[in-house]
Amino acid sequence: MFSVPSARSLLAACRPAAWTSPLSVFTPSLSSASLVFARGRHQLAPRSVKFLKRHKGVLPIPVGGSTKGTTLAYGEWGIRVKGNGMRVTAKQLKSADDALRRKIKPIKGAKVYMRVFPDIPVCIKGNETRMGKGKGSFEFWATRVAPGRVLFELGGVPIREELAREALRLACDKLPTQNEFIDRKAPPRLGNLLIAPEVAANADSVKTSELPA
């Protein structure tokens, strides 16, 4: 007599060797090379970076005599770093930007211009950690500002000086740097030195005419 196979053995023979989920057809495979840093719409962060970890670096010091970024470019009023340079985090910049926008919200057409952007990743390993075992994990984004660097500007429409001073004062309270209030007439700054424009001498004192004999 022939033995009748059981139902379990028949199902085992019909089942494929490797079971594949039907969702795997629509789900792309994620590899380490295809991972891209994602940011929210409310965050101040780069859209994509090639390497998420970077050296600590140093604060920029304008030793070559460049005054780029020390005067207003878009608005009528602004603040710039008066004291030493410092590393400013994305959270501090966002808090200052929110304080400015809340203050000038009643003014139709007023704009806030942020002249710096946090594009430097900061990694923290911990204070009580032994040497070795790689770099620490990513914590937040930051930027390095040099002395005399303009941080924020207000413009778009004419804004009274009193209101601009009050709004920028609220923004300075959110920043760790010592700032100063400037306008369009403010001279450029080279570190802690103000570059004053040369004053033309009077024509009467420069030109001397000889009397005829």
Image (cartoon, grey):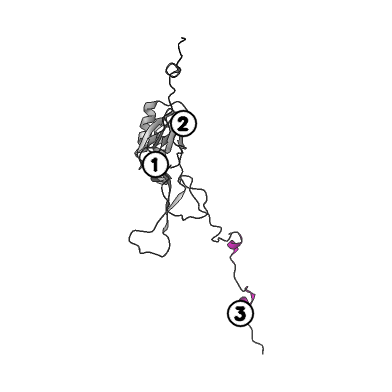
Secondary structure of the residue carrying numbered label 2: loop
Q: Mark number for residue 135?
A: none
Q: Mark 1 or mark 2, which has the lower sequence index? A: 2
Q: Is residue 182 above or below residue 88?
A: above
The x, y position of residue 172, in whole percent, is 36, 37
CA gap between label 3 and label 2 equals 80 Å
Along the viewing direction, whichever of 79 and 171 lies nearer the viewer? 79
| Residue 22 included in the magenta stretch of the image | yes
Q: Mark number for residue 95?
A: 1
Quadrant location of the N terminus?
Answer: bottom right
Q: Which residue is mark 3?
A: 9
Q: Which residue is mark 2?
A: 75
Q: Mark 3 or mark 1, which has the lower sequence index? A: 3
Q: Amino acid at mark 3?
A: Ser
Q: Mark 3 or mark 2, which has the lower sequence index? A: 3
CA gap between label 1 and label 2 equals 20 Å
Secondary structure of the residue carrying numbered label 3: helix
Q: Mark 1 or mark 2: which is in front? A: 2
Q: Mark 3 or mark 2: which is in front? A: 2
Q: Amino acid at mark 1?
A: Ser
| Residue 53 included in the magenta stretch of the image | no
1 and 2 marks in contact (CB < 8 Å): no
Q: Is residue 120 above or below residue 197?
A: below
Q: Amino acid at mark 2?
A: Gly
Secondary structure of the residue carrying numbered label 1: helix
